[in-house]
Image (cartoon, rainbow, N blue to C red):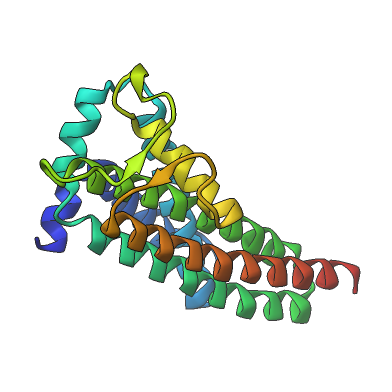
């Protein structure tokens, strides 16, 4: 599926990209391209996250979750790869921003770094939660791949997938949800490895930021 087609199926993400990019391009003041790109990345993330979380934690029933997950299933991996690459690239850009902060003694660079770290960290479990839902409901008659406790309450909704995804992101383990298919195990493995790398990077950046504030 073409990227544009997938973006059209995800109007919240498309809206965030268009609005965030326009605001970053029009952002006042003289600044480097790197700083403007980081501002644009933050605007896109912080516009998209409330919209995505509202969709996931709002009033959508299990039927709506299934229909939406199946519609997004074909292209969800492309969006997931782009989110991962963007988040990792943002960490590299933050390192350069912190160097500029130390040279210019401008606390705005530190604020930009903290905002980027928080937004990039939240983006990944949200996107993985959507990916888990798509894989769960996109397998037809095959095993769903995740066994949630208390399934007598009905099929899992986006809140359940977000719970699972944030648990993996924060702890690199699956907690009380059983992973029961090969495809789902591979996706969990990818997120667990990324969570370890990202959390280690965030810890290193946090120490760097604190050192910059103290010096």
Residue at (43%, 40%) from the top-left corner?
162
Which residue is more in the foreground, 26 or 101? 101
Residue at (69%, 70%) from the top-left corner?
205
**Looking at the image, how many numbered discs can be counted on the residues?**
0
x%, y% of residue 30?
Answer: 55, 71
x%, y% of residue 44?
Answer: 41, 53
x%, y% of residue 114?
Answer: 66, 58
Quarter of the image holding residue 158?
A: top left
Is 199 positioned to the left or the right of 71 in the image? right
Residue at (32%, 66%) from the top-left corner?
82
Tell me if I can see residue 30 in this picture: no
Which residue is more in the foreground, 136 or 134? 136
When the figure is inspected, residue 17 is found, relative to residue 137, above or below; the finding is: below
When the figure is inspected, residue 210 is found, relative to residue 178, above or below; the finding is: below
When the figure is inspected, residue 115 is found, relative to residue 130, above or below; the finding is: below
Residue at (54%, 71%) from the top-left corner?
35
- Name the quarter where the N terminus is drawn: bottom left
When the figure is inspected, residue 45 is found, relative to residue 164, above or below; the finding is: below
Tell me if I can see residue 133 in this picture: yes
């Amino acid at each position: 599926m073409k990227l544009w087609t997938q973006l059209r199926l995800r109007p919240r993400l498309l809206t965030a990209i268009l609005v965030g990019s326009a605001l970053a391009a029009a952002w006042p003041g003289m600044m480097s391209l790197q700083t403007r790109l980081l501002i644009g990345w933050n605007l896109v993330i912080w516009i998209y996250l409330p919209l995505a979380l509202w969709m996931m934690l709002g009033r959508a029933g299990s039927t709506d979750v299934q229909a939406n997950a199946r519609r997004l299933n074909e292209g969800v991996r492309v969006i997931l790869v782009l989110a991962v690459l963007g988040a990792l690239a943002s960490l590299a850009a933050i390192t350069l921003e912190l160097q500029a902060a130390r040279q210019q003694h401008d606390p705005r660079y530190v604020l930009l770094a903290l905002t980027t770290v928080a937004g990039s960290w939240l983006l990944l479990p949200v996107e993985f939660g959507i990916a888990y839902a798509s894989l769960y409901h996109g397998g037809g008659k095959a095993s769903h791949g995740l066994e949630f406790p208390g399934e007598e309450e009905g099929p899992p909704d986006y809140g359940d997938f977000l719970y699972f995804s944030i648990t993996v992101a924060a702890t690199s383990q699956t907690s009380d949800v059983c992973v029961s298919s090969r495809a789902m195990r591979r996706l969990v493995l990818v997120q667990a490895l990324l969570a370890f790398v990202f959390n280690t990077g965030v810890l290193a950046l946090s120490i760097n930021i604190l050192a910059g504030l103290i010096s």
